[in-house]
């Protein structure tokens, strides 16, 4: 499995209209969690965030919001922000435009947000142009990332995941974790350490 832990500058240049990081000189980081809600991983994440008074952004899958509405409500009640991650975790490169946009719209009926993150980071430019109208939000943003923890990768350890999440991170970084079944083994090791590591360095954690 090949992926960039640190998003290269040239990729950001190709798609400048997408949000890759937040321009700031403050000691601010932006943790994001994809693929939830999940009955075990999401409560774990919320409990860990609470220890540091941290805020984060959860890119939720619509069908998982249907399954776990109380956990979704807890995300919002505890001051975090949510974003649309499609209804069925579709790969935009492998899905016809009409079907992809319909799936986003189905998720938007449950997830009221102008933020959208494409699963796998894969979305066609023709699809991206329609996101604003699909989300019914003129301030909508396609949110990518500049640091990928790799917690979804079962070939790496929690230690490597922690290293990925910290070694290339700087002020304004958007960092990706996953509150999912697949990622939980690495997440439960790496997330507490990541929060502690940056808190010790006087960073604060905000939602987008």
Image (cartoon, helix red, strand yellow):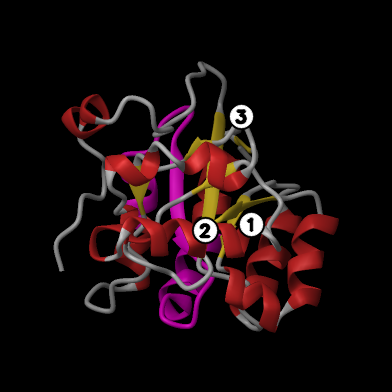
Q: Pointer 2: residues within 10 angstroms few (<14), some, or many (20+)?
A: many
**Badge 3 element:** loop
Residue 113 in the image: state x and y as whole percent.
Answer: 67, 46
Is residue 41 at least partly visible in the picture?
yes
Magenta-drawn segment: 163-192
Compute the Cα span from label 3 to label 2: 16 Å
CB within 8 Å, label 1 to label 2: yes
Where residue 193 sits in the image (x, y, percent)?
Answer: 51, 59
Q: Is 75 located above or below residue 121 in the figure?
A: below
To which quarter of the image does residue 150 belong?
A: bottom left
Residue at position x 52%, y 58% in the image: 104
183 within the magenta span: yes
Give the quarter of the figure containing the C terminus: top right
Residue 104 badge:
2
Is disc 1 placed on a helix, strand or loop?
A: helix
Specify whether 31 is left or right of 157: right
């Amino acid at each position: 499995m090949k992926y960039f832990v640190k998003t290269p500058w040239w990729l950001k240049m190709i798609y400048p209209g997408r949000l890759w990081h937040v321009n700031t000189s403050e000691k601010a980081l932006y943790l994001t969690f994809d693929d939830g809600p999940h009955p075990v991983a999401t409560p774990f994440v919320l409990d860990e965030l609470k220890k540091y008074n941290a805020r984060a952004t959860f890119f939720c899958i619509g069908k998982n919001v249907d399954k776990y509405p109380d956990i979704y409500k807890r995300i919002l009640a505890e001051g975090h922000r949510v974003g649309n991650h499609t209804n069925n975790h579709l790969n935009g490169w492998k899905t016809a435009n009409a079907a992809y946009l319909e799936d986003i719209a189905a998720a938007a009926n449950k997830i009221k947000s102008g933020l959208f993150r494409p699963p796998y980071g894969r979305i066609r430019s023709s699809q991206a142009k329609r996101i604003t109208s699909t989300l019914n939000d003129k301030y909508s943003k396609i949110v990518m990332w500049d640091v990928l923890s790799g917690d979804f990768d079962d070939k790496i350890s929690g230690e490597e995941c922690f290293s990925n999440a910290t070694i290339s991170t700087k002020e304004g970084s958007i960092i990706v974790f996953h509150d999912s079944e697949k990622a939980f083994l690495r997440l439960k090791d790496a997330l507490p350490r990541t929060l502690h590591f940056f808190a010790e360095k006087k960073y604060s954690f905000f939602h987008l």
